[in-house]
Amino acid sequence: MTSATRAGAYLTIDLHAVRANYRTLAAHGGGAECGAVLKADAYGLGMAPVAAALLAEGCRTFFTAHLDEGIRLRALLPFGATIYVMHGAMPGAARDCLAHDLVPVLNDPGQIAEWRALAAETGRRLPAAIQFDTGMARMGLAGADLERLRQDPAWLDGIQPRLVMSHLACADEAQHPLNARQRGRFDAVRALFPGVPGSLANSSGVFLGPAFHHDLLRPGAALYGIHPQPGSVNPLAQAVSLAARVVQLRSIDAGDIVGYGARYVAPGPRRIATIAIGYADGWLRALSGRSYAWVDGVAAPFVGTVSMDSITLDVTGMPEARIAPGQSVDLLCEKQTVDDVAAQAGTIGYEVLTRLGSRFERRYVGGM
Ligand SMILES: *Cc1c(COP(=O)(O)O)cnc(C)c1O
């Protein structure tokens, strides 16, 4: 018996779609280089296969959030590919960044000091990206630091700036006034770093137009099919599909309850299917009563509360053979995208993807 036979759910990752999305983003970016953000295991899709697919597409600049993610990624990439670690190094960990040929993003004076100290110790200028906060107060040097740099350019002695970057807070709202304000502040920062490449655009930023592209694009979500500009047609291909299998079927009568908390009371005779996926797999409890499984393109509504390992569906009137135990129903498919599920759960596609669990039978298609 194969694990595919035993599996309760199947997650399929389409690397052709990831590659097509990379090409779409690169084309939108005009002359800017297109990098790729692979943090959080490539948003849940799997860092190793995604990195291989993007390398084949010509991507040579990658970003992780944590240092340990960068170390994992380093082992997957050829010499010459650049990996930026967006959190930089935690205090005391700068040496590990250097040892693994990772370029830290320096976000505050402490990280600058540690990187400079290591440069002095090794007798080399060490490459780094310098991040500036231009309006979201999350990471990066602040306005006061920028002033200090203006007065004392020697503050970065020992550091070889490879990239100047900042991050947009509202790029998914094209009309938001903060976008132009952040871009203006970023352009002022860049004036202090003549000749050093700049990077501002995340996925949604790529679609804000050429003024936001600078030298290097930093998309994550859009590579994986998430819609960068809600309200318009998604120009990107869905990269993930998910199907779960039926465990059990039963008929219930009017007045019978389904699931924890007795939240669903059958208004009449109903046929109920239980499928092998739940909130432990990332199919959020907030989807209770709000989402669907799709049976050959027909919607079967979730009824009752989403459990840890199972979800109950109303499959009344559906062909018995099609929803017998072992048959699979679709949770991510053409009829229901990651963004659709996110809207049903009251969250964003990023959270749906990064919550995907580890119990699925994973299949990669379109690999090398
Ligand atoms: C996650 C992240 C990105 C990628 O953002 P997407 O919206 O997924 O394209 C880019 N830059 C920074 C600093 C990030 O944290």
Image (cartoon, rainbow, N blue to C red):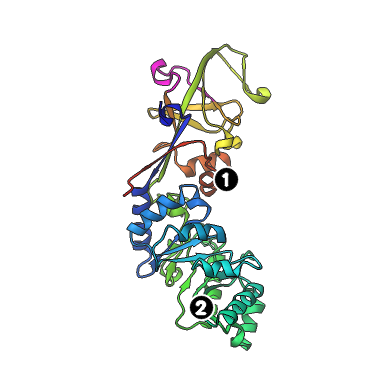
Q: Tell me which numbered mark, 2 or 1, is placed earlier along the sequence.
A: 2
Would residue 170 be seen by someone viewing this image from the given angle?
no
Counting other residues with Cα less than 10 Å from the Cα at mark 1, is it few (<14), some (14-19), or many (20 or more)?
Answer: some
Q: Give the range drawn in magenta.
A: 312-326
- Locate residue 4: give its quadrant: top left
In the structure shown, which secondary structural element does the residue marked by tag 2 occupy?
strand
- Image location (x, y in percent) of residue 144: 67, 78
Question: Depth-wise, is mark 2 or mark 1 nearer the camera?
Answer: 2
Counting other residues with Cα less than 10 Å from the Cα at mark 2, is it few (<14), some (14-19), or many (20 or more)?
Answer: many
Above or below: residue 64 compared with residue 186:
above
Task: Name the residue tied to disc 1.
Answer: 347
Instruction: Identify the residue at horizontal 65%, vertical 25% (top origin).
Output: 260
Query: Which quadrant holds the N terminus?
Result: top left
Beta carbon of the mark 1 residue lies under 8 A of ligand 1? no
* Residue type, mark 2 in image: Pro
Q: Is residue 324 magenta?
A: yes
- Image location (x, y in percent) of residue 60: 39, 65
- Image location (x, y in percent) of residue 299: 45, 28
